[in-house]
Image: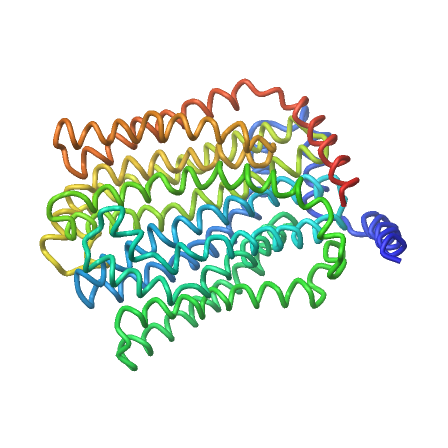
Amino acid sequence: MASENKGKFEDEGNIEENKVPLLLHSESLEYENDDDQLDLKRRLWVESKMLWRIVGPAIFSRITSYSMNVITQAFAGHLGDTELAAISIVNNVIVGFDFGLLLGMASALETLCGQAFGAKKYHMLGIYMQRSWIVLFACCVLLLPVYIFASPILKLLGQPSNVAELSGSVALWLIPLHFSFAFQFPLQRFLQSQLKNSVIAWVALIALIVHITTSWLFVYGLKLGVVGTAVTLNFSWWVLVVGLFIYTVCGGCPLTWPGFSFEAFSGLWEFLKLSASSGVMLCLENWYYRILILMTGNLKNAEIAVDALSVCMTINGWEMMIPLAFFAGTGVRVANELGAGNGKGAKYATIVSVMTSTLIGLFFCLLIMILHNEIGLIFSSSKAVLDAVNQLSVLLAVTILLNSIQPVLSGVAVGSGWQSYVAYVNITCYYLVGLPLGLVMEWVFHQGVTGIWGGMIFGGTALQTVILAIIIGRCDWEKEAEKASNRIKKWAVLA
């Protein structure tokens, strides 16, 4: 019966493919066929239009989602320095560790769903998403002890006792947030790969409104303190999950959502391997700056240093939502073009994405340099913290510029299915070069948090960006299109 339903759905899907002229495919075809006739401006316009169709809503939804964390941290910061340090440690270390791994594992869908959508194998997208739910939920169960034993873990890592105790209490209240990641990330990538980004943006806006309302109520109305600020995140992130789920299963994706299927339990081992490769690739990048927070916690006057660095990392993370949107957009565009067998289109999508994101990064880099005295006021009124943030503003500006390029290159890797290969690059650059250099700058040259951060930026992030640029510059895109075709055939058998 399952096979009959599947065959029926495939037949219906093939009919629908001929009846529904999706903009992505029609524009990609125009780009491919008319490439010789189009001048540079025209080609730039065609590719930019397709890219911004994904990136525009993605920027809005990511900034909106991240703003919920910023609002939580801002509420905590005005309760006191210890509260700010506690919520910062939880957000940047405990949740950050979890977020990076699960987000990375969900990015396997950007490869699979993106290439399948480009090849018009629509029925495969829903099966892929259900497999991702299963894999990520199991991973959440395995990671649960990190939240339960957050306090002793942070003490073991050298954090101040009072901050570690308060952080442990906050982490326990964030367990529902932890499990929301297993469903929200796959839903987002499933919709994103088929250009349904406006839905994600609208649901994110509703979640932000809920978050602002509950934050004010819990902190100032019910006087629940730092725990109240943390609890509000649970409500907001589950609004995202429920909103996207209702849209998906209630008719929003008739071609790509075949309903719940036992086929999701088949091929889980192969799916787990690709998810793990994606998770390692992205979480190594995400954890890199989380480790910076932990290392800072071992310095003298650690509370002020952690507060200042956390403010900078929050601002960096806020702006990082823009290049992460380009990461998503580039991954989808490259995967769609490779899935459609258009290597030239994937190459041009890469060039346009990198150029656009870099220009935006330059703008924000200059903005940080101009506003270096004021940027800390959002999170703290402590003069010591504000002075420390001011001293770190140059490094923050450089980090923002580098991070406007690097995620886009990683997006190319995800769209092409290179996760395992790039994971080795990340390990080498971040953990064999950048991290040791940061340690040397502090413990040998006694440069404090500035030395740690500077060493990690120039030894890790900059080096990784150069290596990825070289790899992508030497890529044979027609060969990658052929590999994508073979990958789709392989996963079609597993589905």
* Residue furthest to the bottom: 222
Q: Nearer the viewer, residue 474 or 36?
A: 474
Residue at 57% x, 68% y is 242
Residue 221: which quarter of the image?
Answer: bottom left
Question: In the image, residue 227 lies at what x, y percent?
Answer: 31, 70
Residue at 47% x, 33% y is 354
Residue at 67% x, 22% y is 479
Question: In the image, residue 285 lies at what x, y percent?
Answer: 41, 38
Q: How many marks?
A: 0
Residue at 38% x, 70% y is 232
Question: In the image, residue 86 lies at what x, y percent?
Answer: 25, 59
Q: Is residue 2 left or right of residue 263?
A: right
Q: Is residue 262 left or right of residue 144?
A: right
Question: Where's the C terminus, which quadrant?
Answer: top right
Rendered image coloring scheme: rainbow
Q: Is residue 30 left or right of residue 310?
A: right
Residue 287 versus residue 186 in the image, above or below: above
Question: In the image, residue 336 lies at what x, y percent?
Answer: 66, 39
Q: Is residue 175 left or right of residue 112?
A: left
Question: Where's the N terminus, which quadrant?
Answer: bottom right
Residue 334: which quarter of the image?
Answer: top right
Q: Nearer the viewer, residue 296 or 388?
A: 296
Residue 455 versus residue 122 in the image, above or below: above
